[in-house]
Amino acid sequence: MNNLFDRTDTAAIIARMNKLTPESQRLWGTMDVGQMMAHCNASLETAMGLNSPKALPFYLRALGFLLKKTILGTKPMAKNMGTDKLYIFTDDRNLEEERVKVLKHIVGFFEGGAEKCTKQPQVFFGKMEPSEWAVMQWKHFDHHLRQFGV
């Protein structure tokens, strides 16, 4: 399974990110390329314990618990999935500024390994092992890079 603890997988995600330009157009969804990069940044910051979304109602956490194996499975993430407000950016975001930030976080996450992962449960999926965070973050980046055709 691809993950951000694997050197080759991490290098491939970085190479794909470096193909994005301010002119990159989405194939689905509503975010532009700068907003998408900020969104990915916030998600990786959660995995690293640098931010923390508000707790969700029990019924959503229960649904997340049931969907966790699907998200961590071999299939790519589905298009147009819902997201927490913490990860939604509607203002203008500079692609280059967001890219520098996210690349720094990706390298920090990779180099830090399991110690770099939060111990807090993921707001929707619940308790996650570092290896699960690494898979989920790789799949999340892959999802959004496919969204922009790279």
Image: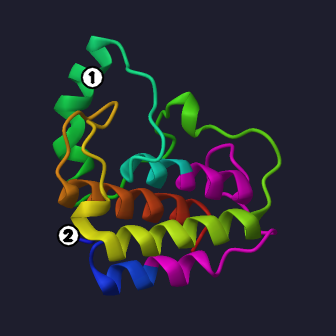
Real-space CA distance between mark 2 and mark 1, rounded to the nearest whole angstrom: 25 Å
Name which residue type carries label 1: Arg
For image coordinates 45% across by 55% down, the residue present is: 44
52 sits to left or right of 2 = right
The image quadrant of residue 103 is: bottom right
The image quadrant of residue 97 is: bottom right
N-terminal of the pair, mark 2 or mark 1, is 2
Q: Is residue 9 above or below residue 40?
A: below
In the image, 118 versus 81, the foreground residue is: 118
Magenta region, residue range: 13-41
- Which x, y percent locates residue 10? 39, 78
Residue on which disc 1 sits: 61
In the image, 18 versus 70, the foreground residue is: 18
98 sits to left or right of 150 = right
Q: Is residue 30 above or below residue 116?
A: above
Q: Is residue 89 magenta?
A: no
Q: Is residue 108 above or below residue 123?
A: below
Q: Disc 2 on helix, strand or loop?
A: loop
Q: Disc 1 on helix, strand or loop?
A: helix
Residue 127 in view, yes or no:
yes
Residue on which disc 2 sits: 1
Residue 27 in view, yes or no:
no
Q: Is residue 35 magenta?
A: yes
- Which x, y percent locates residue 81? 46, 38
Crowding around mark 2 (Cα neighbors within 10 Å: few <14, some 14 to 19, many 20+) is: few
